[in-house]
Image (tube, rainbow, N blue to C red):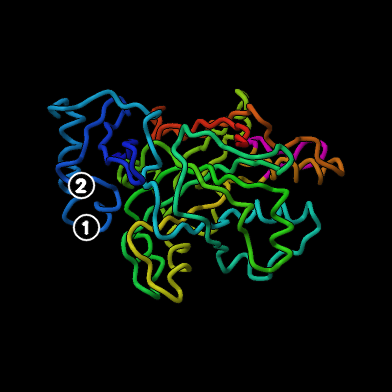
Amino acid sequence: MKLATYKDGSRDGQLVVVSRDLATAHYATGIAGRLQQALDDWNFLAPQLQDLYDALNQGRARHAFPFDAQRCMAPLPRTGQWADGSAYLHHIELVRRARGAPLPQDMASVPCLYQLPSDAFLGPCDDVVVEMEDLGLDFEAEVVVVTGDVARGASPEQGLDSVRLLMLANDITLRELVPLEVAKGYGFCQAKPATAFSPVAVTPDELGEAWAEGRVHLPLAVTWNGRKVGMNDAGADMAFHFGQLIAHLCGTRPVQAGTLVGSGSVSNAPTEGKDGHPEWPRGYSCIAEKRAMETLQDGQPSTGYMKFGDQVRIEMKGRDGQSVFGSIEQKVVQARVD
């Protein structure tokens, strides 16, 4: 099934069930008012939401209305934990090599995870608001799962069993602040503003055969100012699947329902060009990766980061050509100074 959250003036919005083709929706108020409520009592409430979803797809839902992504908050507007990974080793190697940084010795055996702000997420059409253009504003297109409760010390198989929903994310990063914060040894703070998420979150069964081995085997399209810049396969080069990422997160503590775990920027390994230099036929899911490519090939980057007025669009289509999660469509605007 597909679930979304409509804006209603509150912090948590109103849970709605959305049809498979993203054409219609129906309030789930009689079952659960908020997505977190459904996640907390998933085994009892999910079958009821599924019944409403089936009725909506069959045209039997009595109070259905046209679905409007502009009215959406993030499917889960806030939660207790948002842990992002970096499961595409090629991405780690590329950006570190470009800046002359050493690679982690256990990069291929131990997943990388870090925590991000989770108290207030952006909706799919909310503006990206920044004070200045020189902060190195970057988009990062990735896949995210929402978990149920997971016990401490869970295995990767148990981690996969805990996956309740999947969605897309734009993990916004202020690149010029990253080295300043990393140098202090405490990780990110101001470099990571609020993340934006796709209009709908979907249960794994909605992906059909594309959901396999803990990965989503579909291309993730990224468009920047109307030009498609990325079409990376989200499953092809994902070194750690979502079950492994969740298990790593649970290594020393339990995880509660509503925890978000991200894949990191979706990235595919390059192919060898005719001149012997690497080529990236699938493009990039974040500007930092493009700049790293340029640095390795030309000695310095030529692509700048996002500016005021820039727009980014992130979407994933299924094998039937239909949008799975709806699209993230955001514009960069300058913060108002009162």
- Of the numbered discs 1 and 2, the one sitting upstream in the chain is 2
The residues colored magenta run: 270-283
> In what quadrant of the picture does the C terminus appear?
top right
The amino acid sitting under disc 2 is: Ala
Q: Is residue 54 left or right of residue 214?
A: left
Which of the 4 quarters of the picture holds residue 294?
top right
Q: Is residue 117 above or below residue 324?
A: below
Q: Secondary structure at mark 1?
A: loop
Q: Is residue 229 left or right of residue 204?
A: right
Residue 271 in the magenta stretch? The answer is yes
Identify the amino acid type marked 1.
Asp
Residue at 35 percent of width and 26 percent of height: 68
Magenta stretch: residue 49 in it? no
Q: Is residue 208 visible?
A: no
- In the displayed structure, does residue 19 sit left or right of residue 101? left
Which residue is drawn at the image coordinates 70% and 62% (left, top)? 182
Residue at numbered disc 1:
41
Badge 2 is on which residue? 32
Instruction: Return the residue nearer the eye: 60 or 63.
Output: 63
Pointers 1 and 2 in contact (C-beta within 8 Å): yes
The secondary structure type at the circle numbered 2 is loop
> Dot 2: within a 10 Å radius of its alpha carbon, few (fewer than 14), some, or many (20 or more) residues?
many
